[in-house]
Image: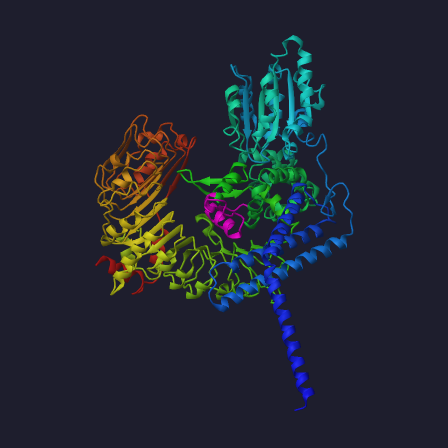
Amino acid sequence: MDPSSYTSAVRDLVELITRGWRMVQEELKLAKDAERELRILMVFNEMMGRLLNEAYSKEVTDEQLKPYIKRIWEFFFDSEDAIEDFRRESKGKRKGPASSFRHHQNKRTLTVESRDIKQMWKDFTADLGITAPAETFNGLTINHAQPSSSAGHGSSSDAIFDKTDHLVGIEGPMNKLVQCLTGKSSMPKMIFVHGVQGVGKTSLVAAVLRNENVKSHFEYCVWMDLGPWELADNTEAALMAANTTMWTLTQVNRQRSLIQLAKAFGDMKKNVGSTANKFNWVLVLDDVGRADVFRSLRSHLIENPPTVLVTTRVRSLKSSSPDYLKAQYDLHNFEHVVLSENDSRSLLYREMEDLQLECDRSPSLKDASDRILRRCQGLPLAILATCRLLKSNNQFNVAATPDAVQWTDWSGRLEEKLLSRGHVVAASGRKIILRLNHLIDDVRDCLLYLSIFPLDRPIRCSTLTRLWMAEGFIEQEGSQPVQEKAMETLEKLLEHNVIREKRTSYGRVKTGRVHNLLHQIIISKLKYEAFTMIVADPEERLPENVRYLSFHSPMGEIDNGTSVKQLRSLHFFEKVHPPSLKNLLEKVERLKVLDFQRYLTGEEKKYFPASLNTFPRKILRSKYLRYLSLRGTDIKIIPNEIEDLAYLESLDLKGTLVDELPKGILKLKVLRHLLVSRSNRSWAADADPTLAVRSNRSLEVGVKAPSKLGDLTLLQKLCMIELKAVEGGSQHEREQLLEELKKLTNLQRLGLSMLKSTDAERLCSSIEKLTNLVALRLIAAPEAKIDLSKKDMRQALKRLQRVHLTGCLGTLPEWILRSNILVKLVLKRSELTIDALQQLGKLLSLEHLELEQAFDVTDMRFEVEKFQKLRFLGLDRFDKLESIQVDQGALPALERLFLAQCNSLTTVPPFITHPTKLKCLELYGMPEEFDKAIKVFIEELRKHMKVKFKEWKDPALEEVQQLPTRGTGIRSVLRQCMK
């Protein structure tokens, strides 16, 4: 071979090796730079977050700025995704060359993405070509309206001089407030007037100050609208520099001036001369959100203490006030509630001339106006805004009378109409959102996330906190569990009246609602982002960059060309279109939350029926999924491949038709919440009506699960799990599952069903290890007796607060009777001894007691000093019960009484007809004689409590009787358990 050919081949080989080495060096350099790029990217992400917070705090709404703010949102999300992807892929041990290569590739990807983001940011700022003047948004000039020195006074202090306020239904609250203000007291008074935004707190206080008794009682009034000034970093300096409205109450229409607080105080002392330390004056602090305002005003409050009126949305402001206030002031709480239905209607009729007359003539118009009022939910601000809207848009026919058809149409879309025309937002939205941004800035994401829920629909608060955690809004800080931090966030929103909660009888927050007015403002705020979309119309087209998508209307067909690669969160509140769902799931890459909230609460079941009957296998492609809820759907089988969802933290299968979980569930090592229960629909088609009756209508079944649940060590909630029937070798699996429970030491809530007498000892042994348990629910198999008294678990179960036991017990275990913190106890079919009520009286903290066929008794007596905290009492299926006696002073806290199917109780217990704290009496399936007897007192009872009558119809049993009986399913399970 020609030597030159050898030379050429060697040269090519050397060049190839050199080029390859350079590529290796470049790859190594890219990977080496990953940690540095990660730090840079984290700083960049934090900077974007600060810029966006500034835009929110200053209410940047300039149309020209929206595209730039949207671009900054994109930078924020891109950097956040890059950081999250790197951290996710970096978790776990690296073993073998394949794992090392993946780790190297992960580093390289981060470096490349970081450099790309930085270059795009450089191009973005260069294209703007703006030299930042005095106030810039990192290169973007912000054109916004800052509060001027007198901002806010036009809508607050001026209310004192406006005698034409549209005040309806405040006579009672105003008289009480006047009496409190003018009453004699050795200490000055500070009255906290709290209520939701828009309820009319400011108008109420203004009306009180116009009262003649109040004007004769005080010489001066100083009014401070604190909304704008609490936004300042240095609150004390801002307060002292703030303009304040001051006037002489006896000449309210002639003298007033805008001066600083310090000067106002000096002028008052000068005017009264030698009595400088004795003059009476009233200080109004309007829209207070933080207790540190009182610290800033301390010197002025101490030198010559005024009577102070505080309006606030924060319910706990009185209790969180500084100690020196409590020492020097007589503190009072005064809640200003929304208008009643009649007062709301009066306000509407007053504002809409001749409307009452037209409603009397037209039932359809009256129905439409009532629907509009229901949407306003008793808020005067919302009603007045609605009236302005209706007037300005000529919702009248040619005869100049209200058009019933148009009003009916608008009643269903009132919030959208108010928002689109700015009637609500322009009036108060800016102030509200500014206050919320400042007061709860650290939970702003959690606040804005409320927009995904439909207007005026209940939100299950436990679901809400799990969603926050899945979205990454709540993160671990130090040793505080993330669950506790989520609950603190929820409580903060509750305290600021953002969410109006519905609590259980024992004080636990169950569901909440965002008031329509505030909900509108939150939704309008999100329109500036363009990354959250609420689908109210199936025809709407989905934007490519949408990240949070919520269907408030039934899902329609979606174009195959729709691209939603950026989607992180997908929610359905109405009917689902399976082909469209499949189409969407094929396109997403980083989906974190998939939520089918078919039934938020029992009242939600009246909405559309479930439409999803097979597990969408495209879900399995969403490798980063953290939250999956299929609640209330008709899904019957969960595939074993669910193990691919390695990051899943919450799995909600409540109310589905799933009867058994696959073994793949054991691979979900970070699972924290496993919520499963079988819908009545799942066993109704298989059940024998005779057996359902024999099991006393309380047939409740959970879902079967693999026996090695102990592998899921992070589980906090596990319910309801059904123990498998004893067939062949399944006894070992049953015992193994009970043993595995010992490993779940993080469990806070546990539910088990189909327990047998042979399970008792092993069950108690395992429960004893669950020291974090707060709620326990155990359901025995039909005709099984469970003895839970063999072990004393008082020391182990120190946190146990709620116990629900269904099935024959014989005796109550001492570890329940000696609990000092038990607040809820439910006993069904317990077959206890006759003195059980005396034993239960030992539970000093008990607030909720529910007894169904728990023991046989003819006379039931409640003695003084027992059940002192009991707020709910439920008695069901006490067939021999003839009388209920309550001693004088007994059951002092009882608010709700539930009586059902007590067939021998024909006379009304005397304590019901006497004035008590009882707020609600529910009667289900009671004897005809009892119903007749109580109707004698019905008019008097309804003056201070709700009385509900209902014929007993068990929906589960009805459903069983309507469907054909089959020879398999739950009937065979019951027969096995009864052997």
Reply yes or no: does residue 406 show up in magenta.
no
- Residue 716 vs residue 470: left or right? left
- Which of these two is toward me, 481 or 506? 481
Q: Residue furthest top?
A: 274
* Residue 364 spot, x, y in % from top left: 58, 45
- Which of these two is toward me, 333 or 604? 333
Tell me the quarter of the picture where residue 928 sits. Answer: top left
* Residue 508 spot, x, y in % from top left: 42, 40
Q: Looking at the figure, which quarter contains the C terminus?
A: bottom left
Q: Looking at the figure, which quarter contains the N terminus?
A: bottom right
Q: Residue furthest bottom?
A: 1
- Residue 179 vs residue 433: left or right? left
391 lies above or below 472: above
Residue range (magenta)? 455-484
Reply yes or no: does residue 480 show up in magenta.
yes
- Which of these two is toward me, 389 or 550? 550
Please say whether residue 86 is visible from this viewpoint.
Answer: yes
* Residue 206 spot, x, y in % from top left: 62, 25
Tell me the quarter of the picture where residue 210 sits. Answer: top right
Which residue occupies 55% across, 64% down? 104
Please say whether residue 541 is visible from this viewpoint.
Answer: no
